[in-house]
Image: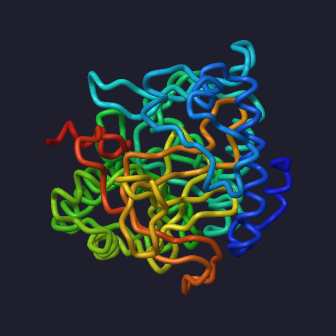
Amino acid sequence: MKFEKFLQMQPYSLEKKEKEEILTERLIELTEMHRVNCLEYANMLRSIDYDRKEIRSYKDLPFLPVRLFKELSLKSIPQKEVVKTMTSSGTSGQAVSKIYLDKITSLNQQKTMVKIVSSFTGSSRMPMIILDCPSVIKNRQMFSARGAGILGFSIFGAKKIYAFDDDMKLDVDELRKFLNQYRGQTIFMFGFTFMVWQHFYKELLRLKNEGITFDFSNGVLIHGGGWKKLISEAVSPEEYHNRLKDVCGLDNIHDYYGMVEQTGCIYMQCECGHLHASIFSDVIMRRPEDFSECEIGEKGIIQVVSTIPESYPGHSLITEDEGILLGEDDCLCGRKGKYFKITGRLKDAEIRGCSDTYATKFI
C-alpha cells in the first residue's frame, strides 16, 4: 500500500479492524523493503528466522530496540540520496541516534505532521511564537531533535518570532509588540515542555508579581519532549496546564509524544488529556518478561510503529518508555484509534527527551 493512500484519509477516521488491515499491509511492505536494502537489518531478520508467511498482523512483525540507532548507522538508501541526518537529544557524553532521510521520507514526515496537527488547530497558518531561541537552528543538513521539532512545527506559522534570546531570556518588548499586532487572532505557540515551564511560565509569573501581565487567551500551545524533570518537581500535567492558564490565560494546550526515530508520527493529546495514535502509526504495550501484548489498563513497554520510514528501518521500534493503553475507538473526544498515557521511563534508561536533556542543566 503506497503511503499516498494514507494521506487521503482523515488521521483519526479508522476503527480497529480497518486500521489493522492497512497497517499490516504497509508495514509488511516496509519490512521487506528494508530487508532488501539494508544489510544490517537483513542480518537481524535472518538471525531470528523471520518468515513473512508467518505474519498475520503488524503486531507479529519484529521490532528493533530504539537504542540500536545510537550504535549502528542504519539506512536503506545509498549515501548520495541522504538529504538530511537527524540526531536525537543527548546529554554530554551520551551517544545520539542518527536517522538518515531521503527526499521522499522527509517530505512524507512533513505531510503527516500537517495532517495530524491541523486536525487539532485548523488548516489556516497562524501568527506563531516559538518558545525557544534562534540559535537552535544551525546546520539544516544535520540537526538535533530540538531543531527538527521547531522546523517541523514552524510550517503552521505565518509570521514567526522567537520568544527568547540566545541566553534564554524572555524578550518582553518583542512579545508585547507581537501580541498587540495580532490582537484578536489565534496565535500558535510551540515549545518543549521543560523550557516552556522554566523560561516562559516562571518568567511570566515573576512579571505578574511585579504588575506586568500578558494575555495569551487566544493562544494554542503544543509542547512535548519529556516530563522527567517536571515530575521530579511534583508538577503534574494538570498543574502545568492550570498554572499556565492562571498566569496568562492560556487554556488551549496540547502535549504530544514523539521521537526523532519516527518523526512525523506524533501522538497528540486530545481535549480529554489522552494521547492518540493516528492512522499513520500505532502503539502496542508489551509485557517486559516476554514481550506479549498487554491488555487495556495494563502497564507495559511501549512499541511504536510508523508507516512513514522508507530511507531507514525505523518502522517498528521498541522504546524505553512505559505506558498504559486506556482504550480504543471510544475516547470521549470522538477520535478513533488507540489512546494511552505515558507512565515513565524504564529503570536505568538514559535521559532522552528534548526537555529532559535540557533540564539536566538545572539539576
Q: From the viewer's perspective, is 8 left or right of 32?
A: right
Seen as rendered, the residue at the extreme top is: 80
Q: Position of residue 320 (x, y in %)?
A: 37, 46
Vertically, is 336 above or below 177? below
Residue at 65% x, 25% y: name it: 42
Which quadrant holds residue 210? bottom left
Residue depicted at 40% across the width and 49% down the height: 225
- Residue 96: image quadrant is top left
Q: Is residue 219 visible?
A: no
Q: Residue at x 35, y 46 (%)?
A: 171
Residue 201 appears in view = yes
- Residue 212 in percent (x, y) is at 26, 65
Q: Which of 86 and 295 is in front in this view?
A: 295
Towards the viewer: 246 or 231? 231
Q: Where is residue 326 in the image (x, y as percent from the top left)?
A: 46, 75
Pick the residue in front: 196 or 105.
Answer: 105
